[in-house]
Image: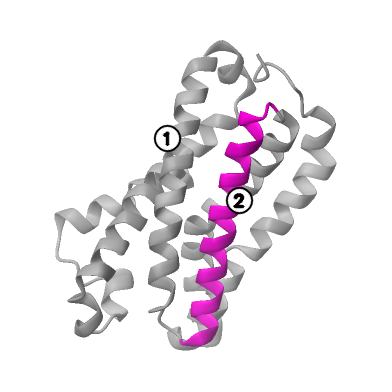
Amino acid sequence: MLAVMTGLYPIIYFLIDRKFGLLSTKSNEVLEQVIWNTAFYIHIVFGGTALLIGWIQFSEKLRKAYLKLHRNLGKLYVSSVLLSSIGGIYMGFFATGGIAASIGFISLGVLWFYVTAAAFITIKKKKVKEHQTLMIYSYALCFAAVTLRIWLPLLTLLLGDFNTAYPITAWVCWVPNLIFAYFLINNIYKPNLTNNPLSS
C-alpha cells in the first residue's frame, strides 16, 4: 500500500504548483536549471514506476503463472531504476542539508544503480539465486522513497529542525533498509531461493 501510494505521488507535481515538498526547499537558481529539472522529473517518474511494479515481482505464484509478464515487468523495472538512479545521483549534488546529505543520496543512487545492473547481468547468465538476492537489495533501496517520508517528519519532530533532520534522513532512509534486506535474505529467503522457474 505504501509503495503504491508513494509510487503515484509524483503525479502531484504535474497537477498543481511545484512549490511544495522537496521543491519548496530549493532556491530559484536551482529550480531554473534545465539539467536539474530534467534529472528531477526522470528521477520521480521512473522511480515511481519502479516502486509501483517492483513489489509484484516477489510473488512466486504470479511468477510461475505469468513468467513472460514477470520478465517484461523486470525489464521495465531495471530500465526505470537505471534512469531514476542517474537522475537521483545528479540531484544529490544539490541536496538540501549540505555535504552530508549529498553523500548520503549520491551513495544511495550509486548502490541502487549497481545492484540493479548486477541483478540484470546475473539473470542473463542464468544465475537465478544471485539475481533474486540482488533484486531484494535493489527493492530495499527503491523503498527508500517510502522510508524517507516516514523518517523525515519523525526526525523533524524529534529534533525540532528540518535542516538538522534532512541530512540524517539522507542516510537512515536506506541504510536500515539494506540491513533489513540482509537479515531477510539470510534468515527467510535464502533457504527458499530457487533456480526455478526463471532458469528455463
Q: Quadrant of the C terminus?
A: top right
Question: Residue at the location (27% across, 77% down)?
Answer: 24
Question: Element type at marker 1?
Answer: helix
C-alpha span from label 1 to label 2:
17 Å
Q: Nearer the viewer, residue 160 or 86?
A: 86
The residue that label 1 is drawn on is: 76
Left or right position of 96 against 101:
left
Up/down of 180 relative to 34, above or below: above
Residue range of the region highlighted in magenta in the rendering: 98-126
Q: Position of residue 85 (x, y in %)?
A: 45, 57
Question: Residue at the location (77% across, 35% down)?
Answer: 189
Q: Position of residue 192 (x, y in %)?
A: 80, 28
Q: Magenta includes 30?
A: no
Q: Position of residue 136 (x, y in %)?
A: 65, 43
Left or right position of 40 against 7:
left
Kind of residue sitting beneath label 1? Leu
Dot placed on the residue nearer the N-terminal end, 1 or 2: 1
Label 1 crowding class (10 Å Cα cut-off): few <14, some 14-19, many 20+?
some
The residue that label 2 is drawn on is: 140
Kind of residue sitting beneath label 2? Ala
Q: Position of residue 69 (x, y in %)?
A: 47, 19
Up/down of 164 relative to 133, above or below: below
Left or right position of 40 against 149:
left
Q: Magenta includes 106?
A: yes
Question: Residue at the location (56% across, 46% down)?
Answer: 117
Mark 1 or mark 2, whichever is nearer to me:
1
